[in-house]
Image (spheres, helix red, strand yellow):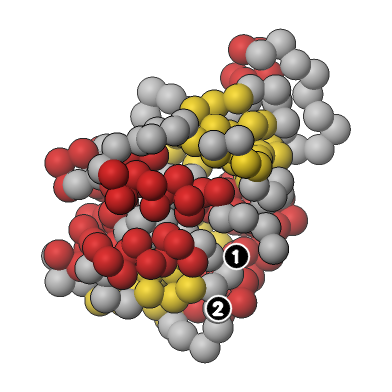
Amino acid sequence: MTRDIYGEALNDYYLHQKEIAPLLLHSSYGDIEEMPVDIFFRDQEEIPELEFIALSLCDGRVLDVGAGAGCHTLYLQDKNFDVEALEISNIACQIMQQRGVQKIHHTDFYQFKGEQYDTLLFLMNGIGLAGDIDGFKKLLHHAESLLTSRGQLIFDTSNIDYLYEEYKIKRPEHYFGEINYQYQYQGNFGEKFKWLYMDQKMLINIAHELNWVVQILFEDEHDQYLVRMEKRK
């Protein structure tokens, strides 16, 4: 069984209230990035503007997908939203429970069925779990089955085109926003996984192809932008 490297790092931070070792993220574009684990435990005052706008747009019954340690779920819960957390990491689910998250689903997004929500929330590039362009189309199809007739998707993503210039690497034959990652923590490696970032043109093309309405609500100085989508009536 593959170790939950991400969950182990979250748990150590939660227990000690500080990072006891760096959580490293190896990427297919050659970089090794140190992930600041404290961002998964931010309180209300530390939520950045983009995420604050996203949270303010939540409506009705909300599912926080890839909830991590629960910072967004807890924010909405404190505002009396009917909110539930979905997270694939069992360790992260245990942390959320200890932090007071009331409704937690420990499962893979694509295995989660039989419920309907007014808002599906994917923050901190959470939509990246789609892995690639075909995966994003699959994600939209599954999301449709989880949304009410007035339901919405809210997520952020980034145009990472600049990375290929910055790291002076050759563009891949596949879509440039499809990245392979692997976590490393205290000398142990997690399973490799794919993550997706989309530029606005690609996102809008897919939305139109699959009959979704897409709105770009906010952009920051780092080519990260906030999106709201709903199925075209």
Please identify the quadrant where the N terminus is shown.
bottom right
Q: Which residue occupies 32% across, 64% down?
A: 96
Look at label 1 and name its amino acid: Leu
Residue 139 higher or lower than 150, as above or below: above
Q: Earlier in the sequence, mark 2 or mark 1?
A: 2
**Left or right position of 123 against 195:** left
The relative height of residue 113 versus residue 85 in the rendered view (above or below) is: below
At mark 1, the secondary structure is: helix
Q: Is residue 75 above or below residue 24?
A: below
Can you identify the residue that label 1 sits on?
140
Q: Is residue 113 left or right of residue 57?
A: right
Q: Position of residue 56 (x, y in %)?
A: 23, 55
Q: In percent of the image, x 44 and y 82: which residue is there?
A: 116
Tag in front: 2 or 1? 2
Q: Are marks 2 and 1 in contact (CB under 8 Å)?
A: no
Considering depth in this image, is 39 or 215 the residue closer to the camera? 39
Label 2: which residue? 112
Q: CA distance from mark 2 to mark 1?
A: 14 Å
User: Whole-percent x and y of residue 111?
Assistant: 61, 77
**Residue occupying image coordinates x 45% and y 45%:** 9
Indicate the quadrant where residue 175 lies: top right
Q: Nearer the viewer, residue 76 or 25?
A: 25
Query: Is residue 152 visible to the viewer in this orientation of the structure?
Result: no
Inspect this view and state whether residue 116 appears.
yes
**Residue 61 pos. (x, y %):** 31, 76
* Image x and y of residue 156, in percent: 44, 45
Estimate how packed mark 1 is, as few (under 14), some (14 to 19) or many (20 or more) residues with alpha carbons within 10 Å.
many
Q: Amino acid at mark 2?
A: Phe
Residue ranking furthest to the right: 173
